[in-house]
Structure formats: structure tokens, C-alpha cells
Image: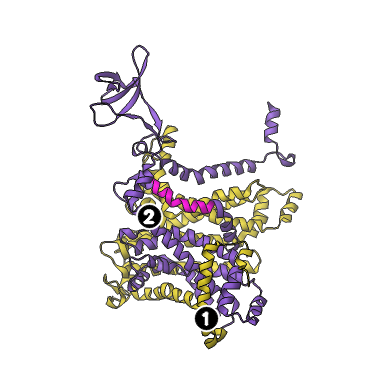
Chain colours: A yellow, B purple
Amino acid sequence: MTTDPREQSGFSFGEAIAKPVRFVMDLIDPPLRFLQRTTGIGGMATFFLLPNMLIFGIFVLLPFFINFAYSMTGGTALFLPDRTFVGTDQYARLFDCSNYLDANSCAEDTFWTAVGNTAWFVLLQVTLMIVVSLVTALILNRDLRARSFWRAVFFFPVLLSPVVVGLIWKWILQRQGLLNFGLYSLGFEPHVWLNDRSWSFAAAVGVSIWAHMGFYTLILLAGLQAIPRDLYEAAEMDGTKPTRVFLRITLPLLAPNLLVVIVLVLIRAVQIFDEVYVLTGGGPGTSTLFLTQYIYETGFAAQLRNPGLAAAASILMGAVLVVLTLLQLSLSRSGEKKGGRK
Amino acid sequence: MSRVAQFLFRRKGGKGWHWTDIVTWIWLIGGLFIMFGPAIWLVGSSFKTPAALAEFPPTILPYVTQKVTVEGIDKPLDLYEVTLEGGKTVRLAELRRIGVVSQMIDPSNPGEIIKVNIAQRKPVREMTFASENYAEPFTHFDFVRYLWNSVFVTVVATLITLIVNSMAAFALSKYEFRGRTVAMLLILATLMVPLSVIMVPLYSIVSALGLFNSLWGVILPTVATPTGVFILRQYMLTIPDELIDAARMDKASEWQIYWRIILPLTAPALAVLAIFSVVWRWNDFLWPLIVLSRKELYTLQVGLSIYSGELNVQWHFILAMTVVTMIPVVLVFIFLQRFITTGIAGTGLK
């Protein structure tokens, strides 16, 4: 250990940073040696795991459990001990409807509007997202020159922040925006897209697909490239039609990846918030109000904050997500067993 | 002619064009425009003056009507190219417009008012890059502060993420101990607890710890990411245990083994996680929006969304600030995109 192996592996933070880091790390060593002598190597394992577990415990597990307690309390107080126990009143309020298909008949009508909007959004966005990313992956899997360039093209928006994505499209869809300019030069009437209930919903679906499709394309492309080439060669020799090749070879062999992607898209779609919030703010009216925004506004932003109600709604959403995540984990595990996915 | 066409459209291996080839190219070229176009349009717009932004139809490049100051008049006037009756063209400044008649004056001879039909005048256009869109937010607004907050959150959170997660991954990959499976399952379970589900209680915990309205309140809840542990553990499992045994024989402490042997060998995976973490933390929105309520603590994302949600949106500033917010991510895209794409393709995690 005479030289820093960091440099040998071709990755260097730069000597300027490495030096103080090395100094600090060596400074911590003596007390840790002492710790190792008293607790043994097993104790050191705990030591290495501890910071992570502590942060997990405080910021993920603890909130997860006290969320249930929150959902059983009322009032506007922030801290749990100050809140009054109300049992299942918050859930009862969420489900207080005379007709479940009509949000206006519910006591908490915005909740049901958000649920309805989210359900429609999930249905539309997931279907379109799968189609668009599958087509893109299939195209990128062809015998293309500069494939990595084209792959990067579709991946670009994935890295943009939701706020930037929202603003980019808000700028394009506004009254004097690029879309209206395009329509105007083709002889159509300009339209204020985001002031229109159905168009702003369509924009929410479209923009979220634009922003994330590159990510799913990438996973599907990896799956496509794992399909053995000789299968296609054999099919070509037999003169099999492309559609038949797709249905009989590509689709069945891609199925494990496709299922994982579907569930991933579902999980993300249920939680849709950021880019739509910046793009439309949930409006006009409540036409693009989704569940996460409902929870956020009920818990933090509304004039009459109701953390208990927000917690109850978030637990209902969490239940849906848990089912979806378990589905994903079992799917990716079965995919691993078949060797379809790494 | 047909020979030229044949040459242009001939394909490798002498095969003819199939309809799927046409679909492929339409899709790719269309994708190029749809994926990059909106961002490029935004960058282009960010150099326009408020007057140019309000124009419809908009121009691609930042053109504005040239202005002149005329003696005796306070405001700068728009300059026009006017075709006079005799066919002569002169440059006149518009004083005011009444119906279809424009009252104009010659900048070099301001005494006399010339009446011109508006059909006979064309604005003199010039290209100006409104660099004040960028300069002003830096000097007059809290923009520098937001930028600093974002940089601080991103850098500190990424450093802590790397340390905390690599330590946990080391423990989970190189030690046998009771409760290892439980720890793994716990970490796995957190995949099911996204922020949107626990934001209400998490907010109360962060407040109870005194981290509300503090950048640390933004940083700490995000640093123990299950994805990070997985990427690193997966990589560390490939490091041979013999290395560790040999180091132990040489009386190296466990801590030394961790940071002198394991960490350097995990560098490629650490680099991937670092890139991911920088992009995640730079882009974080909902949680900073909840934790930060004081203006001077906003991160770029929060500041941008608040300003753009105002009733009177100052688009020329918003656009420029959006471009600045995009820069680090675009740099990552240009230089490090390959790491990310292979990272995602390998783990299926984001």
C-alpha cells in the first residue's frame, strides 16, 4: 500500500482533494483500531452498517410507522403527542361518498377528483409510455449506425429536473409559444392549451412521457440486446415475416423485461407530481390534480392544513405502491432465474 | 437522374428499402427534434428581450426592432424603414401611431413630423442578445444564493451518500453477521416507501430535529439510498476476499481495509453512484419545497417554481435561470451519459 490504488484504477479525485481525505481517514484510524480491539471484527461490521441504518431508521422507517398513527389523529398540530386521537375518522371522511363514481357527491371531493385523475393518468400514460418506449427500443436495436448517439438523444430529457421539464413545456404551450406559432404558420387558430381542461391533462400525459421514456427505452433496449442473434438469423433463413418474428421471438423473450418496465412505469405514474405541478399547478380548476399534489396540499399548503387526512390518503396510496413494488420484485426475481436480466 | 437516386438510396448489402427503414428514420429524426427542440427553443428564447418575447409570431433568433433616441424626446423610439412617394427609402423614428397613419420624425432632423401610412413602413430589425436576462438575476435577485444552496446540497449530499452507502455495502458484502438478511430486507423495503407516502410524518420528524428551514433537512433524509447500497454491494461482491485476508495478515485494521483496499477498487461503481446522486440531488423538488419556507434557503428548483408560479411571470428572467439550472445536467449528459446508461441497463434502477 505504498501508492494510492485510486490512481491505478484510472479514477482520481485529484491530489488536492485526496490528500486531506487521506489525512482525515488516517486520523480516524487509531480510535477505530481501539474499537476493533474491544468489539472484535463482528463489531466493526455493525459499525460500518450503523450510519446507514440510523439514517434509514430515522428518516424512512420511523416516518413509515408513525404515518399510521398520524392517520388516526385530527387537528392541525404538527407533533404527534399534541394531536387528538380520532380513530378511523379520517379514513371515514375520505370514503364518505354517496356515489363513488361521482367525486362531487363525496365529503372530500378533491380527494376523489385526484383519485379519478390519477387513475385516468395511469391508464393513459402507462399504455402510451410502453408503446412509445418499446417502439423506440425496437428501432434502436436495429442495425443502426451511431446507435449510442441515437440512444443518447432519447435519453436526454431523463436527466432534466422536473421543474426544468415543466418550464420548458409551459413556455412552448403558452399563448405565444412555439406550438401556437407552428399552428399559426400552418393556418390554424392559436389556442391557450394550458387553460383548457382536457388539453392540459393531455399535456401532463405527454410531457411526463417525453421526460421519462428514454429511461424505459434503455431498459428495454438492454433486454432486446440480450436476445441471441442466431434466433433472428434462423428466422431470416426461413423467410419469416418481420411481424411474425416480433410476435414469436422478440415479444416472448422480452416479456420479463417488459413486465418489469410496466410495473416501474405504473409505480412512477401513481406518484406523478413535480413536472405537472410546475406545468399546470393542478389546473385549470382541478383537471390535473393528482394524488401526490392532494397529499402535499392537504398536509402543507392548504389554508386549513389537515396532516391527519393527508396521512390517511398517503397510506392508501402507499398500499397501492406496496402491491406494485412486491409485484416488481417478484417479477425481476423470476426474470433473474430465467437469466433474462442481470 | 434515376442513377443519382439509386446511388443516394442504395443500402448496405444491396438490399432494397423496406417500410420499416422509412419508419426508423422518421422516428429517429422526429425524435431528434422532439427531444432536443424544446430545450433549444428555451435556450434561444432566454436571450430575447421582454419585447421580443412578447412578439407573435416569434422569431427563431433574438431579433428586436432597433431603437433610436431623438433629441427632445425622453423615450427611445422604434426605427422604421419608410418608402416615400418618390420610391426613396429613408429611416424614420415613430413618434406615435393613429389608426393606419404613423407620425414619424427624422432622427437627424427632429423638428418636422412626417405622416406615413403604416403599409409603407417596415421595422428595422437587429439581433441583440439580452445578456441582462442573465446578469440581472445574478445581481438583483437571490439567484446566486439559490445557486449556492443547490450546489451545497448537491455536493454535501453526494459526499455523505458515497461514504454512508459504501460503508453499509462493505458490511453487507464482506462480513458474516447475525441480522445481515434483516438489514438487507430493511433496505429493500425502503424501495416501497417513496417520499410521497411518508412526507407528512417525515416533515414532523425533521421539524422535531430542528432541521426545518435548514439545508441539512433537505440533505439528510435523502442520503441513505437503497439504490446506492445495491450498486456498491453488487460491485464489492466481485472483489476477492483473499485481498482482505492478506491485509489482515499485514495487521491492517478493518477501517484501513475499507478505505485503502475496498474503496479504491470500488471506484467505478462509486463514480456511477456519484453521477446519479449529483443528478438526483440537483433535481430534487418536492422535499426541498416542503422543508424550505424561507426565501434565502430555496434551492434553484424551488426558487424557479415559485417565481414561475407568480401572477406576473417575468419570463425573460425565468428562462435565463432555467438555462443556468440546466447547465450541470447538460454537462453530465455530454460527458458522463455513457456511465449512466450502462448503470441503468445493468441494474434497472434509477
Please tell me which residue lies in front, B284 or A65: B284
Q: Quadrant of residue B242?
A: bottom right
Question: Taking B186 as reference, is B127 left or right?
Answer: left
Per the image, the residue denoted by label 2 is A277
Residue B350, horizontal then vertical, whole percent = 52, 61
Q: Which residues are magenta?
A: B319-333
The reply to whether residue A193 is in sight is no
Per the image, the residue denoted by label 1 is A30
Q: Which quadrant of the rendered structure holds the N terminus of chain A?
A: bottom right
Q: Is-magenta flag for residue A253?
A: no
Of the numbered discs 2 and 1, the one sitting upstream in the chain is 1
Q: Is-magenta flag for residue B322?
A: yes
Q: Is residue A256 above or below residue A135?
A: below
Residue visible at 42% across and 32% down? A187
Please tell me which residue lies in front, A286 or A220: A220
Front disc: 2 or 1: 1
Q: Which mark, residue A276? A: none
Residue B207, horizontal then vertical, whole percent = 33, 71
